[in-house]
Image: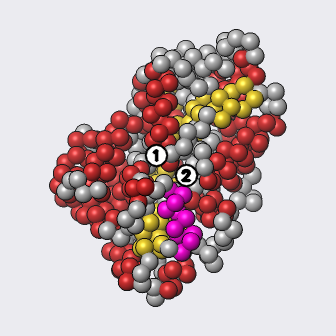
Amino acid sequence: MATAGAAALALGLAGCTSGGSGDTGGDSGGDGAASEVEVFTWWAAGSEKAGLDALVGVFNEQHPDVEFINGAVAGGAGSAAKDLLQSRLQAGDPPDTFQAHAGAELQDYIDAGQVEDVSSLYDEFGLRDAFPKDLVDRLTVDGAIYSIPSNIHRANVVWANPAVLTEAGLDPAAEYADLDSWFTALDAVKAAGKTPLSVATTWTQVHLLETVLLSSLGADGYTGLWDGSTDWKGAEVTDALKDFEKLMSYTNTDRDGLDWPDATQQVIDGTAAFNVMGDWAEAAFAEAGLSSPADYIYFPVPGTDGVFDFLADSFTLPVGAPHPDGAKAWLETVGSAEGQAAFNKAKGSIPARTDADTSDFSPYQKTAIESFAADTIVSSLAHGAAAPVATLNKVSDATSKFTTGASDLATFQSELAAAVG
């Protein structure tokens, strides 16, 4: 995977030191401490679990003497998992390793002194040469690195059912330069009696919101939302929120009781035409036995062509991990070429390593590798790269109020400005 364009990667990592010791050696958990590892994730179902299972398969081959303990907590985007994790960390009961999104989300754990510096593992495992230098640089905080990424995901992707589009009198090969042209297509699907745009619970709505902001404001304007150069109270943001409000009017009414696999399944089943979701959805289409472009199509969210909305899953070594040697073994597999190839092929993402074998990856994944190399890179809000957890929680609360009718657009914009400011 080439990295031209990765210089624009804005992970939102502010310089800050950790309270961790940086010691990744020597298991201190008592008898048999190195014989197991509790891996805490939110990969509990669907293609996410398939990716985890594939990674565990490689782990068992590489470390047959270490027992994998699955600490997965269900809930898309990790909202439930993050709440439980924080409770455990505050209680001094950390798992051996936990999943976190690379970027600003990690900053909370760094500031709290809850994660160790794993820089020495980058040297031991040869990761400084395997990962793109730009990515390593942006994972480095005051000379320290606090996680090992397992993948690269793209958030700004539309998935669509070509049969539903054809039934609505639309050309499945049509391109939509902006949201206005997409609205016309959504109207046609609505007139044909199908759900134009499937969506699920709050985090998927925030995911949709970030892509609308990106489409309406452009890459620089969107990035400015996080560095302070774009005014959240400005007219351009108001226009973007109006577009979001209009998009939500095309969505399924049962959305708040669903999670992302359910919304994606509506496209697979042909009850909905479009779905905006990260490229972990690619694995869901593959699991259903579908192939593109005959059974499903994909394209950047209208108005975001040439921009890669970035996120990455990564794994940490918590301070006080009961089985640090087990965690070290897991981190070695996560960063390995074999682990990244198996995991990402199953999950729909692309490896963070440049030397992983991607020859049998899907056509979508190969296009994602090309896009990550060439496109302007921006950071995902909904998936921890652009803003800390506390900010995202406030944005999510404001979004939920707005989409359930508990606030109006002006209040929504004001609450978003307060959340980020």
Q: Residue at x 50, y 73 (%)?
A: 271
Q: Is residue 406 visible?
A: yes
Q: Quadrant of residue 289?
A: bottom right
- Tag 2: residue type? His
Q: Which mark is residue 153?
A: 2
Q: Answer with mark 1 or mark 2, whichever residue precedes in sequence.
A: 2
Q: Quadrant of residue 336?
A: top right
CB within 8 Å, label 1 to label 2 = yes
Q: Residue at x 36, y 49 (%)?
A: 223
Counting from the top left corner in percent of width and height, residue 165 is at 49, 81
Residue 253 is left or right of residue 123, and the answer is left
Counting from the top left corner in percent of width and height, residue 77 is at 49, 46
> Which residue range is magenta in the image?
260-270
Counting from the top left corner in percent of width and height, residue 178 is at 37, 72
Residue 225 is left or right of residue 415, and the answer is right
Q: Which residue is mark 1?
A: 383
Give the camera-side residue of 257 and 12.
Answer: 257
Residue 157 is left or right of residue 404, and the answer is right
